[in-house]
Image: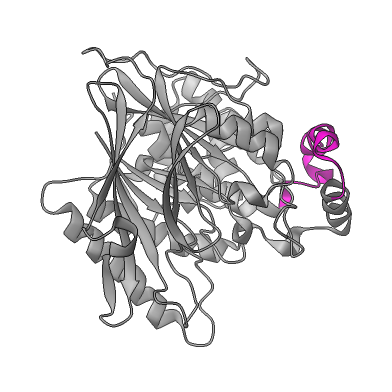
Amino acid sequence: MLRILQLSDIHFGQEKKGEAAHLDDVRGQLISDLGMLLGASKALDLILITGDIAFSGKKEEYDRAVEWLGELIAVGRCDENAILTIPGNHDVDVNLISLSAKQVHAQLRNSSAETVKHLLHDYTIERDEVNSIFPKLSTYVDFARGYNSEFEQSDVPRWVRYRDIRPGCRLRIVGMCSVQVCDLEDRQGTMILGDKQYIFAEDREVVTLVMVHHPMHWFLDRDDAKSHITNRSRVLLTGHEHVPDLNKLTSLSGEERLEISAGATTDTKPKAPYEFAYNLLELDVLDSGVLSVTVWPRIWKIQKPSFGADVVMTGGPDSKTITIDCHLAAPPAVTAPPPRADNVVSQGTAMQRDETADFGKLKHFFWHYLTWDQRIAVLVKAGVLPTSAENRLPQTVELSALLQAKDAGKLESVWDDIMSFVPKEKIKPNPFKT
C-alpha cells in the first residue's frame, strides 16, 4: 500500500494586505490535521505537489516552502525523497520573460496543434542564453532539483519516478510541465503540453499516475494529449482551478481511470464556502489486479476554523474508496525489477537519473542551501568542474557534474563540503562514509 499526500496551489508569497497570519495559521492547521489523520503509527510514502508552490516564482517564496515542507515531512514521518513536484503558472517568474519570449509564446498559441509539435521542439533545445522557454522557470527548477523532480531533458520537460505499491506491483508517476508557454496572457485552451511529454510507453505491468497542473481542457493540444494520457494512465492529479473534485471515468475504449483535483492548499476567495483543501490518498492493488484508491478529502471549515472531511465529495463518510480495473495480473510475491529508463521519444538520450535515497538527500541540500557560487566551489573541489568555472553555469551542467562525482565515488567528500554551507540545525550525518 502507498499512502500519498496530495497538495496543490500553496502559493507562498500571495500574502498581501495582512493575510500572512491567516494563511500561516491555515498551513499550520493542515499539518495538525494531517497528524490527526495519520495517528501514532501511520507514515506518508509520497507527497505529490501539483504546482503553484510559489506565487510569483521568487527564491524567497521557495525558501519559505522548503521550511514548511520540512515541518510537513516531520509529521508525515518521511524524508525529502518523499516529495515530488511539478510547476504551475505561479511558479513562472514573469519578470524573466523577455520580449522575444513573449513573441514566441504568441506564435505558438496562434499555431495549429500539429505545427506546435515542431516549433516547440526547436525552441526548447535552444542554448540557455537565447532560450525562450525555460529562463522563466529557472528558480523553480533549482527548487525542484532539491526534491528529485528535475526534467528529463530540455525538450522533454517531465520526469518519471517509480514506487512499490506492494511486492511485484509498482506505481509509475509521470510529472509533466504545463507551463512551457505561460505568461500573463494565459487563457483556457491556449496552454501547450507538447507530445514529447504526453507520449509515454503503455505498460500493463505498472499502475501509471500522471501529475499535471492544468486540467486537459486548458491545452491547445488537448485532443491528442487527452487521448494518450487517459488511455495510458489510471490516475490523473491536477490543480490550478482551486476546486477539489473526484471523478471515476470510463474512456470510449473502456479504460477506467480516476481524476482527482486537490483544490488549493491556500486560496483567497472569501465568498467561497471553504477556502482551502488537500487530499490524503491510499493506493493498493487487490489480489484480483484491481487498483483500490481510498481518498480522504479535507476542506477548510470557516465556522470552526479548521480542516474537516469533505462530506459532499464522499457522500457522507470521511473517506471514499474507488476501484479501477487496471487489467493487471495478480501481483506475484517477488520484488519487482529496478526501474528502467522511460523515454519513448528519445530512448537512450535522456539525462541519467538516480533515485537512491542518499543521493536524493544530497541533491536536496545542494540546491536548497547553497548559492550558485557555493555549488560551483563544491564541484570544483570535487574535481568534476574546471577551476575556471567562475560564472553561473546552466543547471544541467551542475547536475551532470554531480553525477560525475557520484560515478567517481566522491560523494562522501561532496557531502561534507555541502554541509559546511548548511545551517547547523539542518546538518545531517554523512550517509556516504564508509
Examine the rendered structure and indicate whether residue 266 appears above or below residue 403: below
Left or right, residue 66 beside residue 138: left
Depth check, front residue: 116 or 410? 116
Q: Can you see residue 282?
A: yes
**Which residue is rendered at x = 77% and y = 41% of the image?**
128
Depth check, front residue: 336 or 252? 252
Examine the rendered structure and indicate whether residue 386 appears above or below residue 321: above
Depth check, front residue: 209 or 363? 209
Residue 269 in picture, x, y percent from top left: 50, 78
In which quadrant is the N terminus drawn?
top left
In which quadrant is the C terminus drawn?
top left
Residue 383 in picture, x, y percent from top left: 57, 28
Q: Would you say residue 62 sits in the magenta stretch?
A: no
Left or right, residue 55 beside residue 414: right
Instruction: Give the total number of marks visible in the rendering.
Output: 0
Examine the rendered structure and indicate whether residue 268 appears above or below residue 115: below
> By what rule are the colours in the image chosen?
one colour
**Which residue is rendered at x = 65% and y = 57% of the image?**
92
Q: Can you see residue 386?
A: no
Residue 408 in picture, x, y percent from top left: 49, 19
Q: Would you say residue 122 sits in the magenta stretch?
A: yes
Residue 352 in picture, x, y percent from top left: 56, 23
Left or right, residue 71 beside residue 49: left
Most prominent secondary structure in the magenta stretch?
A: helix
Magenta range is 110-135
Q: Given the current orientation, which residue lies at the most extreme bottom position? A: 17
